[in-house]
Amino acid sequence: MGRVLYHVGIDGGRGSVLATRLVVAFETDFRFGMQVDFAAKELTVKLVYYGPALSGKTTNLRAIHWLGTSSACGELMTLETQNDRTLFFDMLPITVSSESGIKVRLKLFTVPGQVMHNATRRLVLQATDGVAFIADSQRSEAAANRESFLNLKQNLAENGIDPDRVPIIIQFNKRDMDDIRSDEELEAIAKQSREPIYRAVATRGYGVMQTLRGLIRETWTKLEEEHALHEKFGLSPVRFMQEVESKLKHDPRQQER
Ligand SMILES: Nc1nc2c(ncn2[C@@H]2O[C@H](COP(=O)(O)OP(=O)(O)OP(=O)(O)O)[C@@H](O)[C@H]2O)c(=O)[nH]1
Ligand SMILES: [Mg+2]
């Protein structure tokens, strides 16, 4: 899998001291949403992977890191407890340079899904430009999905972000498991919700890039509406999505169920 920048096992001793330092070091990083540097022709966009505990948020970022081209994907930073649970967040930067000369930096974050980490979730969510909600397809997790989705809306509102206007897409992950919600059920959910719905098996990389591209497309459409990026940078939404496609197209190991 390669280039993991920080991988910290929290042991309650030295690990937690290190974790605190990392949190301080990155705090400035996740406080901001879209930033424009006109002089450097650089645009930074913040995207957050949200969802209940163990739904596969960290696995999505690992798969993107593994499947994406090395020219686009930077180092993956993961910060976990001993049992592979996210304690604070993960972060993966992706850079898309376009022919028009503008460089777009996408910062992908995950939140910790465990209920007790709500303050951290709210902190990581602040100023986000778009959200991928990673739901667990297992029937047993339906209530946890619902609760986490409500928690997302509440934390968006508490961060001063209108939950009805921020781009959100939903991924139903773990399609390989037993006793999952059927495709027909997901189609029925898709008809009722304003959010586009994707299916995935993140451990195999299936559906992960489609989800990411969908998230980027929805987010860019909203940013274009609000900031007239085409006019300012000469980069049309269609052209930008073509750049994204070419940078994130490397999907050799994706497989349908
Ligand atoms: N079978 C199966 N297992 C998966 C899939 N995606 C993730 N997992 C497993 O589910 C467990 C949790 O995955 P994570 O990616 O750590 O979940 P998370 O959402 O980051 O969890 P928190 O950090 O606690 O919020 C791991 O054991 C993964 O290997 C999938 O598509 N299929
Ligand atoms: Mg995680």
Image: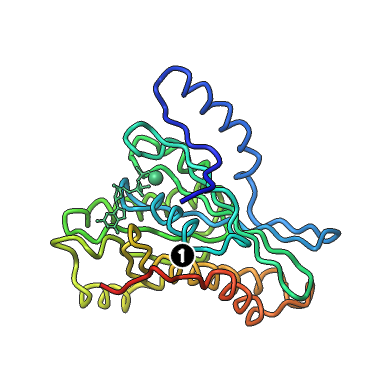
Q: Position of residue 78 (x, y in %)?
A: 48, 41
The residue depicted at 31 percent of the width and 61 percent of the height is: 173
For the residue pair 70 and 216, the one nearer the viewer reads as 70
Q: Residue furthest toward the bottom?
A: 238
For the residue pair 109 and 185, the one nearer the viewer reads as 109
Q: Position of residue 114 (x, y in %)?
A: 33, 40
Q: Residues within 10 Å of mark 1 (few under 14, many from 20)?
A: many
Name the quadrant where ligand 2 sits: top left
Residue 128 vertical placement versus 119 (above, below): below
Residue 17 vertical placement versus 45 (above, below): above
SS of the residue at dot 1? strand
220 vs 14, left or right, is right
Name the image quarter holding the C terminus. Answer: bottom left
113 vs 104, left or right, is left
How many labels sit on residues? 1
Q: Report the coloring of the rendering.
A: rainbow
Quarter occupied by residue 223: bottom right
The residue depicted at 70 percent of the width and 67 percent of the height is: 97
For the residue pair 184 and 155, the one nearer the viewer reads as 184
Q: Residue furthest toward the right?
A: 39
- Three-letter amino acid code of the residue under disc 1: Ile
The residue depicted at 44 percent of the width and 45 percent of the height is: 111
12 vs 43, left or right, is left
Which residue, given by chain and number where applicable, does mark 1 sit on?
A: 168
Quarter occupied by residue 142: bottom left
The residue depicted at 66 percent of the width and 73 percent of the height is: 224
Q: Residue furthest toward the left?
A: 179
Q: Position of residue 64 (x, y in %)?
A: 47, 59
Q: Position of residue 180 (x, y in %)?
A: 18, 63
Q: Is mark 1 within 8 Å of ligand 1?
A: no
